[in-house]
Image (tube, rainbow, N blue to C red):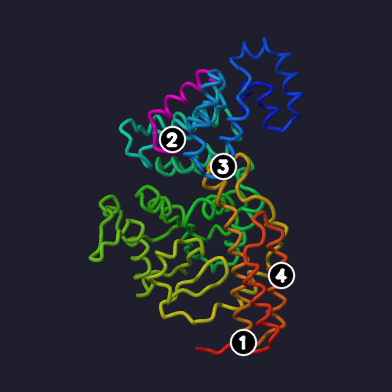
Amino acid sequence: MKRQTKVCLSQSLIRLGTHKALMFSACVGLAGMLTFFGCTKPATQELDQALAQYRQNQLNEALPLFEQAVAKNKNNAEAHVWLAETYRRLGKRNEAVKLARRTIALDPCNSFAHAILGDAYNPIYSTWESVNADSTWTHLQKAVACDSTDGNAWVSIWSEAIHRGDLPMIKRALSAAFKSGFFTKAALAYNRWMLRHLPEQALLVTNGDMDTYPAVALQEAEGLRTDVAVVNRSLLNTASYTRFIRDHYKLPLPFPDSQLDALGAFKDQQGNLITVSDQILQAWLQQKASGAFSRPIAFSVTVDPSFTNAIKDHLQMAGPFSLWQAKPAPAMPDMAMLRSNLASIAPNDFAGPFASAQDRSPVRQAFTNGIVTNVTATALTYSEALIKSGDFSEAQKWLSWAEEFEKKTELGPSFTEQITSMKAAARSGIVPDKK
């Protein structure tokens, strides 16, 4: 059941952008009631400034402003909980836990505070001396009991349920996060685009949150491309996640089960850190090269180039992903695949934010909208190949498409100079020298 949050009326109005005069009169009229519920008039200036810095991932700049807001409003739950989350993200877990518990004292069913405690105690992501898996699970469960629409908590529950081997909760968490609106229209459009054109039974290697969470949520909620094994590079460092994808996707692993827990990171002769994830992925590629692994292997274009650089000669660009091939890949991208990928796009679906208003990750708020540039980059890659092949009119068509597409996105134009230069090359009617 969704909790009834006890917050100041003025605080709620601030978040809605209501006129200050109305907020002031409302608080004055309800002063006695607000005091009874443990609310005082919030320090709107500090809190609003802190939230603005936080959402730009400027946590060190946000921290003193949150601290000021708490100092001026010792009974304000919102100020306390945001300060707690900032402490947690800065690695100050003792302070984070103290503030989160103070928030719960002010507002016993504060979903955000319980989610902070769940994440702070999680032993998977921390070496803090007080980590406790049972505390993590208890507080995450409490978070969604207080607010069943808290997508942040449901995403954390999905990850923790994987580590606990709780398949029903894995499915429930994905469905709940999807229904909560945590994944925006644009984020879902991008992930649909990425999934739809993959080869049958592909293994798709993803990099981060927003090329993984929406994809697996679409598989669960819409039944979209459930044949594709979505494998997150970071999560692949944990044995529990590796076993989950093995069982969930019927995905053969390159190591026996008894060896998974013994795998560890090491440095090679050049001093490069080789993670568990790197070892598993490299073993899959070796099996693919020998014919012992039958699934097509694709890498999302969001995957860090530091990993794919060693295999780049075997990757062929195909839109939002590149396909690995045993023999060195052709220099030209897969033109049929690129055209099919681009033709399937409804630009209006990619308009708007990629991180929802309820998303409390400052990293996703600050940077997720940049993922849309992969669409434009695909159109430019296709157009460049068209110019090299002498199909100038088709190149101009897709360059104009890319120009209009960018205007619809929240990020706005990012490739203006490249598009202008390529349009000039297409109009010249001269095929570039092939070197």
- Say whether disc 1 or disc 2 marks the residue closer to the N-terminus: 2
User: Residue at label 2?
Assistant: 88
Q: Magenta span has 22? A: no
Residue marked by disc 3: 55
Which of the two discs, 3 and 1, sits closer to the camera? 3
**Residue at the image point whose x is 51% and y is 53% from the top:** 212
Amino acid residing under circle 1: Ser
Badge 2 element: helix
Location of mark 4 (residue): 401
Q: Is residue 420 above or below residue 65?
A: below
The reply to whether discs 1 and 2 touch (Cβ–Cβ < 8 Å) is no
4 or 3: tag closer to the N-terminus: 3
Residue visible at 53% across and 81% down in the picture: 332
Real-space Cα separation, disc 4 to disc 1, in angstroms: 19 Å
First in sequence, mark 2 or 4: give its number: 2
Label 4, residues with CA under 10 Å away: few <14, some 14-19, many ≥20? some
Q: Which segment is the magenta one?
A: 89-108
**In the rendered structure, does residue 104 fall within the stretch colored magenta?**
yes
Could you tell me which quadrant the N terminus lies in?
top right
